[in-house]
Amino acid sequence: MSAVDLLSVLCGLLALCAAGVLAVLAGRVLRSLNALNAATEMFLAEALPAVKELRRAAEQASAEVDRIDDLLDVASAIGDRVDSATEATFRALTSPVIKSVALATGTKLAARRLRGRDTRSAQATTRPPARKLSRSTRQSKKTQQSATEVVEVISGRGTR
């Protein structure tokens, strides 16, 4: 056998081995591809119902959010109405209450005067005032303080 014949036989054997290796590799690739297809089908079989369930849950959540948004709008409108009603009530009652307190204080002072000045003068001599105020100034301060307390109670800011 000559060198050319030997080289031809070796090349043929090498080509035959390469073909065998490629056939084995092709078989393995085919098996891997089949396994991948099976896994893909299993994934789709499980994922599609899950995606549908997720979509349905998202739609329900969206509907609930819309409903809660509407409820918040209604609650905000009610709060605004209550605030305006409270303000209107405060405005409507402040002046008459102040006038009523002033009338009550004036009536109280008039009743004291009609009863006699002796009780008042006896109290004045036993307790010296820190600062002398005129009678009208003391009366107006008492009236103002009483009116302020009544307004605070009506508006909910008072402690009574």
Image (cartoon, rainbow, N blue to C red):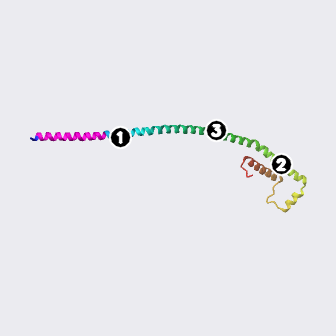
Disc marking residue 104: 2
- Whether residue 110 sits left or right of residue 82 in the image: it is right
The numbered mark at residue 74 is 3
Q: Considering only order in the chain, which callout, 1 or 3, is on the residue closer to the N terminus?
A: 1
**Element type at mark 3:** helix
Q: Which circle's residue, 3 or 2, is located before the other in the chain?
A: 3
145 is within the stretch colored magenta: no
Judge from the rendering whether residue 138 lies leftward or rightward of residue 114; answer left or right: left
Left or right: residue 146 compared with residue 16:
right
Which residue is drawn at the image coordinates 56% and 37% (left, top)?
Answer: 63
Horizontal and vertical percent position of residue 111: 88, 51
Q: Is residue 86 above or below residue 116?
A: above
Three-letter code for the amino acid on which mark 1 is drawn: Ala
Give the residues in magenta.
4-29
Q: Find the distance from the CA under tag 3 to the CA under tag 1.
A: 58 Å
Mark 1 or 2, nearer chain start: 1
**Which residue matches tag 1?**
35
**Left-right relation of 81 to 135:** left
Q: Amino acid at mark 2?
A: Ala
Residues packed near mark 3 inside 10 Å, few (<14), some (14 to 19) or many (20 plus): few
Question: In this view of the protein, which residue sits in the foreground, 46 or 159?
Answer: 46
Disc 1 or disc 2, which is closer to the eye? 1
Q: Of residues 1 and 88, which is closer to you in this image?
A: 1
Q: Residue at x 53, y 37 (%)?
A: 59
Is residue 8 magenta-colored? yes
